[in-house]
Image (tube, helix red, strand yellow):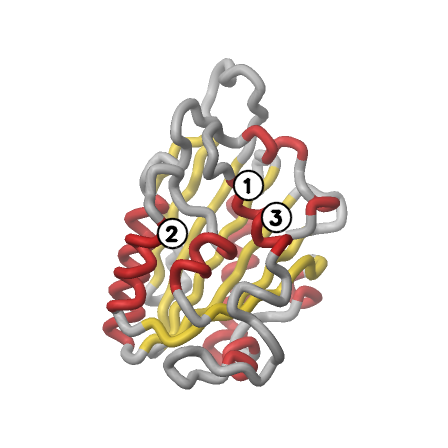
Amino acid sequence: MSTHHRLPSLNRWRLGARSLVGLLLLAALVVGAGCGGGGDHDGGGGVSLAELKGYLPAAGELRLKQQQEHEWDNATDLLVQGLVIPAATTASKLGAAIEAAGFQGAVGSELADSHPELNVRIGAARFDSEAGALEVRDLLHEEDLKQPCSEACVVSPAEYELDEIPNSAAVHHVPIRGKLPPGMSRVEAHHAEFVIGPQLYVVQADGRPSANFSAKFDKLMRTVYATASSS
């Protein structure tokens, strides 16, 4: 996600070294790296990352603007460069667990709307079995339910249902009520994962809180699922 589309409120989502902004700025610095290369690059398990990209919707289908694209052939880079995980989680340890589940490779996109009021990260990861993909879906869902901040935080994670999407798990990072911690602004987020065969799809969206934030996320998820299931 390029810095010129960063929401001001996200600069103060959480305190600590592993902030959301820190992760996404790092992602911007590794464009074309992140174990990525040309579109025909294969992951460590022989998966075609170019093929994997075809399972994700284009930015125009989501009515968003493309910011960055990434390819990964190891799970730790995926976590550090492509996803938001809790500040207390060790990326290398979680990455090792994902590798052990049969991780073969992953691709991802960072997108934003034109205002900008919404930031979105979508990714697709191939595993050597559906069981491995389901295992990692559950691992990431457990992380999504943890408090994302190292100290004071402006959101509270809660289970969220995606009734129209099979084999899915989701979390709503609900904005806290009342006075905010010093130097922080309000934000709302959703994280979700679903599995189709040996492929795991991850969607993370964050932005300014609104009455229809969840409705917009549900619509986005339907588009992502429709593309993934028809490719």
- Image coords of residue 83 (percent x, y): 47, 53
Mark 3 and mark 2: span between their CA atoms? Answer: 17 Å
Mark 1 and mark 2: span between their CA atoms? Answer: 23 Å
Nearer the observer, disc 1 or disc 2?
Answer: 1
Q: Please state which amino acid type lies under the numbered disc 3.
A: Asn
The residue that appears at 34% across and 54% down in the rendered structure is 92
Q: Which residue is mark 1?
A: 22
Q: Earlier in the sequence, mark 3 or mark 2?
A: 3
| Label 1 residue SS | helix
- Image coords of residue 143 (percent x, y): 32, 47
Q: Which residue is mark 3?
A: 119
Q: Earlier in the sequence, mark 1 or mark 2?
A: 1
Quarter residue 227 falls in: bottom right
Q: Which residue is mark 2?
A: 170
| Label 3 residue SS | strand
Q: Please state which amino acid type lies under the numbered disc 1.
A: Gly
Quarter residue 77 falls in: bottom left
